[in-house]
Amino acid sequence: MKKMKKVLSLLLCMLLMVGCSSGNDGQAGTTTNETSGESVVRIAQDTDLSTMDHHIATDGTSFIAQTMMLSGLTALDANNQPVPELAESWDVSDDGLVYTFHLVDANWSDGTPVTANDFVYAWQRLANPDTASEYAFILSTINLVNADAVTAGEMPVDQLGVKAIDDKTLEVTLDLPCNYLLGLMAFPSFFPLNQAFYEAQGDQYSLSPANLLACGPYVMESWTPGNSWVFVKNDQYFKADEITTERVEFKFIQDTQSAMLEYQSGNLDVVKLTGEQVDAYKNEAEFTNRLEGYLWYLSINFTVDKFQNDNLRKALALSIDRETIATNVLKDGSIAAEGLIPVALASDTNGVDFREGAGTVTAYDPEAAAEYYEKAKEELGGDVTIDLLFEDTEASKAVAEYIQNNWETNLPGLTVTLNSKPKKTRLDLMNDQAYDICLTRWGPDYADPQTYLDLFISTNEANNAGRYSNADYDAKVLAGTSGEDATNAEARWQDFIDAEKIIVDTVGVIPVYQNGGAYMIKSNVKGVEFHSAGVDSFRNITVE
């Protein structure tokens, strides 16, 4: 508990730095286009942009890009709180089951009005099984009426609990109250879609800037896969007069050393640091550090026979030195994962952080790990070989190599093959169950433990890539999300504590670390908003 309090205190200090630059000193950088005089901010990204279709996207890079050009009913402010956006106000019924949103007068970038039907059509497309969205489950997460049946193809999409009362009034009906619904309305999966424009694009929708329509602060000017994606101010945005940065350029640079050289040369304004770079620049005025909500874990493919062996999975889980990974390998403010639910994600009714209330449920015990491995070898008929899949970023490579060292050192005879793939390929392999173990992550879509626990329910094939299945786990999660405890805050919380313990104890997944973020941000760049849950935002970025 003392350790947890220290971590939370450190986190509070970090959060004070969120949304602002690290100081007023240092080079200003090239934040003005010398030819046009327009203000421009250039941001390095270590993963490429996958898709601009907000119903197909599953990764943070794509979600960030989508929030540049699309808006939801609400937006998240710098403190991670929902504020009015395309909905200027809303009413909630006394029983918490009906939300009535009143829309502002806003236009799409082609000048057509944003209407309530744009949300109805978007949510119906998200739910439609033909869309095959991996995020369709999020409609059930907010307890939207008929969401389960519609996404399963058992009901038509027009039976979904969302309807347009008129052009400027949207009604959302739930089966159970959802106290984090307003925050989720800022998440891209819930953003609107102009039906006429979408249908006119056919199968070309979202593949290029010409096939996109914006209702947010920016429009996409260009997109070069593997290189860059650029946004320029949307003059049709209903708050266009508040947008002072005319151009935001994202550049895909995997090599963080190269990105830092570009930053020092004035060609980039925001870069993320890794490993030794953090030590080198942590005393610079423009350095900033944060604790992110992302939880990195090892997904185990249960369709591979050897991973049905309990002793093997326990050996693997107990032989990972998480503290060293966070402190000496990453060095970016990451912390060892103490469970599946991150620190400072959500608190109970008494204000106690979930992680503090649940305690530490992970452990590093190489001696016990070796004993479990010996038992596994006897049961499996000899030593084991494992293919460890990870994405081709510097941080993932460093962590994967350290895990390989841990496993092969602590479990003599075990052989680990490293398998580095681009993120899209890594996701495809996971979705096809074509892997052994994968180093992967989940960023919280909203501030509640459910955003993690839902992933591993046995029926959630879209997200449960490893096909973990445990009846006790399912029962605990479902009791708290849609069952007898769903409206009892204390009982729901205990269900979630119990569910986390079940999945970690049975080694359904192996939590590794909670991501930190070390950045260099030019002193004249303000308004970068880091969100512990939801999507980090560059919508309000400014240049002074």
Image (cartoon, rainbow, N blue to C red):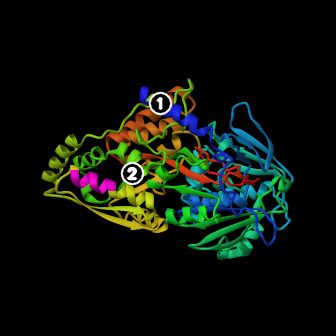
Q: Which residue is mark 2?
A: 329
Mark 2 is surrounded, within 10 Å at the Cα level, by few (under 14), some (14 to 19) or many (20 or more) other residues, namely some
Q: Which residue is mark 1?
A: 6
* Residue 125 can be seen in this image: no
Residue stretch in magenta: 402-409
Q: Nearer the viewer, residue 262 or 308?
A: 262
Mark 1 is surrounded, within 10 Å at the Cα level, by few (under 14), some (14 to 19) or many (20 or more) other residues, namely few
**Residue 486 on the magenta segment:** no
SS under mark 1: helix
**Residue 407 on the magenta segment:** yes
Question: Residue 177's image quarter?
Answer: top right
Please state the horizontal and vertical placement of residue 355, each as a whole percent of the image.
46, 33
Please state the horizontal and vertical placement of residue 84, each as a whole percent of the image.
77, 44
Label placed on residue 392: none
Q: Outermost residue, top direction?
A: 350
Q: Amino acid at mark 2?
A: Val
Query: From the viewer's perspective, is residue 194 above or below residue 200?
Result: above
Q: Amino acid at mark 1?
A: Lys
Please state the horizontal and vertical placement of residue 294, each as a whole percent of the image.
50, 48
Please state the horizontal and vertical placement of residue 458, each as a whole percent of the image.
42, 50
* Residue 163 can be seen in this image: yes
Residue at the image position 55 percent from the left and 44 percent from the top: 290
Could you tell whether 99 is left or right of 385 in the image? right
